[in-house]
Each structure stands twice: as C-alpha cells, then as structure tokens.
Amino acid sequence: MSPLSIFCLVAVLATATTVCARGNSIRDNLKPTEWISPRELENAPSVDEITFEKLQETPAEEAAELVNQIYHLSQLSRKIEPSYAPSPSDIPVYTYTPTGQRVNTKLNQLVSTVQQQPHFGQQEVTIFITGLPQQKLRDAARANQKLIQAYLQAYNGQVQVQGGQDADSEQDTSSSEESSNSKQTKPSGNLVVIDLGAVIRNFEELVLLDINRVGAAIGNTLVQLTSQTDVPQEVIYIVAQGIGAHVAGAAARQYTRQTGNKLRRITAMDPSKIFARKPNTLVGLARGNADFVDAIHTSAYGLGSAARAGDVDFYPNGPSVAMPGTDNIIEASLRATRYFAETVRPGNDRNFPAVAAESLQQYKNNNGNGRRAYMGIAADYDLEGDYILQVNAKSPFGKSAPAKKQNSYHGIHQTSGRSSSNN
C-alpha cells in the first residue's frame, strides 16, 4: 500500500465514540487500535480525493470528522514524511507602497525589491504568511484582503488597496473592520505578504508540505533582510495563517540559528494540524520561537488544532469545530484572520476581551468574569496560558466588553464539547 493510501475518508463510529468520551479533543495518547481498524484502513480511499472545495461545501461537523480521521491515520502510520516544498522562486510575495500600491515579487527576490523602497524597515515590518489558496477559496481571498486593508489603514491611512481588487462584496463598511477616519501623513510601518497559500494548490500538498524546509527558506530570507537592508529584527512581526503558522515557527528558528537573535513576535491565526513530519525532528510553532508567540484557534476540531501553540492561546467560543456565523471548516479557520484584522483597524485593538478559563462552560459559569486579556494585536507580551471568549456571528465580531490588563494564567486546557453555536 502506497504512503498516500493511508490518508482517507472514513466514518468510523468507534473512533467518534472514543473522541466524544474523551471530551471531543484529539488526544495524542489514543492507542492506534482506537483510531481505526486495519480492514477499514485497507478499504479507505486516498487523500487526493479530498479537495478544499469539498471541505468548503461540506457541513462543518462532517468535514471536521473527515479531517480528524485523516490526521489520525497520518499519526498511525508514522511513515509519512513531508515531500512538498515549493521553491523560493515560485512563492509569490508582495509589498505595499505608502500609497497602497502593490509591488509583486518572489521570495528569492524580496530583499532586492525592498532595497528599492525608501525608508523600508525604519518602523515596524509585518510579514503576513498565508496558508490557503485564495485563488480557489473566496473565503480566503476575503479574509486576506481584510487583513491587508487593515494594515494599510493602520500604517498608511489607506482603506482601499490600489492595484488590487477588494475580495469582499459585502457592504459592511460601517463595521469595525472598515471604519476609521484615520489620516496619516507618514507611514508607520511596512507590510510584506508571503503568499504561501498560492502554491498550496490542493489538500494533498497541504498534508505533505515540508514545513521545516519552507520555513528555513523564509528564515534565510529574513536573515538577508536584516543584514543587507539594516532592518533590525526587533521590528519584524510575523502573522501567519493555518499551516503558515508552523512555517513561521520554522522560519523563526532558522533565523535564530543563523543570527543568535529572536524575532519579536509571531501571531498564529488558527494554526493547522501537522500531518507529515520526519522522525525525531522538531516541527511546528511553539512558545520560544519568538520573544512572544500568541495563537487564535477558531477551528480547533476542524481544519485547525486544539494543541497549544504559543505563550498564550485564545479559543473563541471554544475550543470548537466552527465559529458563530460560519457554515464550514474553511470559513471557520479563516475567522481567526478576520478577528485579528478587526483588531488591527485603528481604534479596535481591544474589541476582543478574553478571560482565563479552562473551558467555555467555566467561562459561562463565571458570567465572563475573571482574569482578562485582549485577543489580537493588543495582546500583552507577558501573557501566558489559555483564554476563552465569545464572539459575534457578524462583523464587528468582537464583543467589546471592558477589560483590564492581565499578568498571566496557567490553566489545564479542558474542552466543553464540539459546538459551533454561540449559546
């Protein structure tokens, strides 16, 4: 049986029962025999039968079960190694001028491109690593555009992107994702988009992505960026989506290996499950990869992962399969990007107050009271532990309740059930 044949679509009642009995979480301590039987494994179709489009069209709970089965099978085999690594010359990158004009380049040409941009790196440099193909998924295009527009507004006072098309046709400009009268005469930062999602053309390539190899290529580019353009590493901030979050972790580790210095911050927007990994090799985002690592989990039991990924992990309505107002796990995963984008908009950085809690039920039992922090751009660097919050089904997504600064909280993460409701 070929390696790819172990990845499959299966509906195994015994596994589902086991998961429910363990609090609806994906536990590494499950025995392989509890995941799937050899006969069911042998009869299962291969991963190339899964498409992003199908996951987008399938109800969230059903799609989540399929993805979880694929994940379990990948861990059962332990023979599946990452084999897909797009070349730096194939990974699209674009930067933005102070007027909002997009400049297209490739990862291997990023340094030479920004060298031609006056004042680049004199203030904050945000690097956005995408994780899903926006060319195929409208939800991805929409979420990415929201985040890009938010940064252009925050840095340059620009609301619309010049030289690019707004992927969101909704007339929601009155929301906190859009509204701001901010006018700036001087840019306060630079935005770089590494469109990794553009070269993840199908679900199979996502499953087999060589996270460490791609991350090393990005990390080496960051080394060149700081050494050849005089950009200090203290101003570099990586925000990364889905599997791109793990690539960001690998990039940061490579940067530290090469320079001895750490990047300032990494924000993970629904970090994905890791399906393929080499034996005895560290892979994936983790606390310590940067001075501060924070993660937002919006599809913990779907396309994302419930596992802690940072110094502080935020679980809106959760952890759960999906978010209020979402119909599928693709949209749910991308809500993390939408939530974060909302906080980037000037004046909205404290829209998502969260409470240190071990479960959504504990959060509700305490009526949302307890140690508090802000999810998103305003997260304090001294935060630690797990935080729960509730969100709105439509933009503005943040509840905007008052909150005060929190030092730290260490909680044992417990789940309250796989639910995408806001009740």
Image (tube, helix red, strand yellow):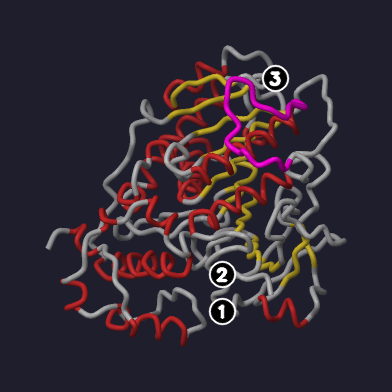
Q: How many marks?
A: 3
The answer to whether 229 is drawn above or below residue 252 in the figure is: above
- Determine whether, in the image, residue 381 is placed left or right of residue 184: left
For label 2, count other residues whose C-alpha is less than 10 Å away and answer few (under 14), some (14-19) or many (20+): many
- Disc with the residue nearer the chain's start (3 vs 2): 3
Q: Amino acid at mark 2?
A: Ser
Q: Nearer the viewer, mark 3 or mark 2?
A: 2
Whether residues under marks 1 and 2 lie with C-beta atoms below 8 angstroms apart, the answer is yes
Instruction: Look at the magenta stretch and give its main secondary structure.
Output: loop
For label 3, count other residues whose C-alpha is less than 10 Å away and answer few (under 14), some (14-19) or many (20+): some
Q: Is residue 53 visible?
A: yes
Residue 37's x, y, as percent? 23, 80
Q: Which residue is mark 3?
A: 98
Q: Is residue 307 visible?
A: no
Q: Secondary structure at mark 1?
A: loop
Residue 417's label in the rendered image is: 1
Task: Identify which residue is drawn at 32% across, 40% down.
Answer: 85
Task: Identify which residue is drawn at 74% across, 25% down.
Answer: 156
Provide the residue span drawn in magenta.
Answer: 156-172
CA gap between label 3 and label 2 equals 39 Å
Residue 12's x, y, as percent? 31, 79
